[in-house]
Amino acid sequence: MDNLPIKMRAHGVDFFYGQHHALKNINLDIAKNHVTAIIGPSGCGKSTFIRLLNRMNEMVPNTTLTGKIYLDCLDILSPCIDPAEVRRRVGMVFQKPNPFPKNIFENISYGLEVNGIKNKQLIEDRVVESLKKSAIWDEVKDRLHDSALRLSGGQQQRLCIARCLAIQPEVLLFDEPCASLDPISTRKIEELILELKKDYTIAIVTHNMQQAARISDYTGFFLLGDLIEFDKTEKIFKAPHDSRTEDYITGRFG
Amino acid sequence: MNQNTIQKIGFGFLSFSVIATISFLFIIIFFIAARGIRVISWEFLTAGPRDGMTAGGVAPAIVGTFYLTLGAIIFALPLGIACAIYLCEYSPKGAVVNIIRLSINNLAGVPSVVFGLFGLAVFVKFFNFGASILSGSLSLGILVLPLIISATQEALLAIPHSIREASMALGATKWQTIKKIVLPAAVPGILTGTILSIGRVAGETAPILFTAAAFYLKGYPKSVFSEVMALPYHIYALMTEGVYPEKQTAIAYGCSFILLVLVLLVSGLAIFIRQRQRSYYHG
């Protein structure tokens, strides 16, 4: 990987849902301040993989995980690490916008409050800052105390991004963030991701190959739990090494 | 027969069912109101009974019902909500929890007089609370626990998993997630359960028969260890005892009317609160 600084590293990761072998010996590096896209057909394990990076999958009962995942030099799977600590440093935006049934301000301040920040002024500053960074400030600045559920889908998703940014994570994980959005909202989210990579390390799961091509620097192609190919996005889309990758990106299956 | 005719017959049957149900409801309300409203006066609402229950008011029974209902809700609401939270959010999924759930649902089907006997044996005799507001409230509380638990469980299960995930992904603990995200969002549903419980508690006779209610008392209860008069039991007493059935029946309808109005008022208030919460939480 061109000797770029690595922010997260999966090393020999296997994952099981009960007996089902969902991820097989995955080795993948996520470069700092770059966008890494994970593509592949439904059920290939791409969402499962990204949810390992902030330890969300351990809330699913009856699963087994082996291998190592590092955040910088920290082994995040080590039993002495608090998963909440990992999640503070590795934020996540989900497939469907999932704002809390609270007002817009509270949606952002919640993350700060649960992490022990009590200073009102600091909270207020962070809320404004995160809303601005997520390119939604102009749309909501006059109605911060309205229910977040009154926002449109695209606005809700940007609010969810703002909610992540407020607790100042280092890595942002996006799990098909545009799957339920219209093309205009999708474009806004994509522009935002490109803007955010200056300050954050980003991994995005997407079904949309054009999206991966547009916004990512590196792309990994998953198929049936295997990481088939992982390379620079340009390379994956112009001259894939593996014929299965080529078949998928040219639309022959998936 | 063509499909449209079948559909029309189907819809016809469905709307008939709704109309029949609503008619029963209105007939009951009208019947009670027409007979009850005649005896309602300022004295009826504020004075105690006199002349061997044939005149005067029912104020002590109103006050007694208020205390019993309040006591039952104070006891059962926190306990029921806590129990539901544990069953829904914390307990490991499996056979044991299913059996517990099933037992709670079955508890809801136990005849109310059984709770009365249980209250008599446990609260009145064993704990020696005597026939009192305390014993009556506890018996009524146990009676509505299953109702509150299942309503709360329904409300909690209706909260989407996605917002719990969102909260956990921000580094919140499970406890923080439940306290600050899940419970506030479940309030409208829990309120619905509470409304139903209040109506149920205020109207129950059997559980207080042996544990709290008195046929006639001078004055108002002085502490939680006092016996009380209560509206439903007062109605029962008026209709089964005494020597002036006509006068007593009229008073019984008056009591029924008051009970009905009280329950409707409480429900109305709770529905109002619930709607406000809903419109806030659901955009």
Image (tube, rainbow, N blue to C red):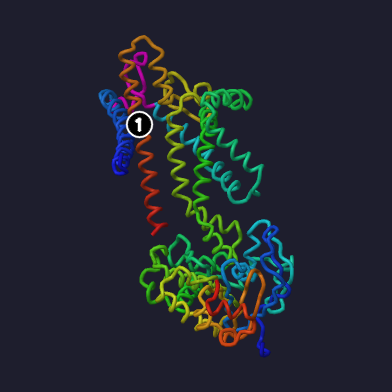
Residue B58: say if magenta.
yes
Q: Residue at x 62, y 74 (%)?
A: A222
Rendered-image quadrant of the N terminus of chain A: bottom right
x and y percentages locating residue A211 in the rendered image: 50, 79
Residue placed most toward the observer, A43 or B50: A43
Q: Does the rendering let one see residue A33?
A: no
Magenta stretch, residue numbers: B40-59
- For the view shown, which residue lies furthest in the top direction? B243
* Image vertical order of residue A24 relative to residue B185, above or below: below
Q: Position of residue A154 (x, y in %)?
A: 42, 71
Q: Secondary structure at mark 1?
A: helix
Percent across and percent down for residue A70 are 70, 75
Chain under callout 1: B
Label 1: which residue?
A: B260
Taking B256 as reference, is B165 above or below it?
Answer: below
Residue at point 48% right, 29% down? B222
* B195 on left or right of A34: left
Total marks drawn? Answer: 1
Q: Residues within 10 Å of mark 1 (few under 14, many from 20)?
A: some
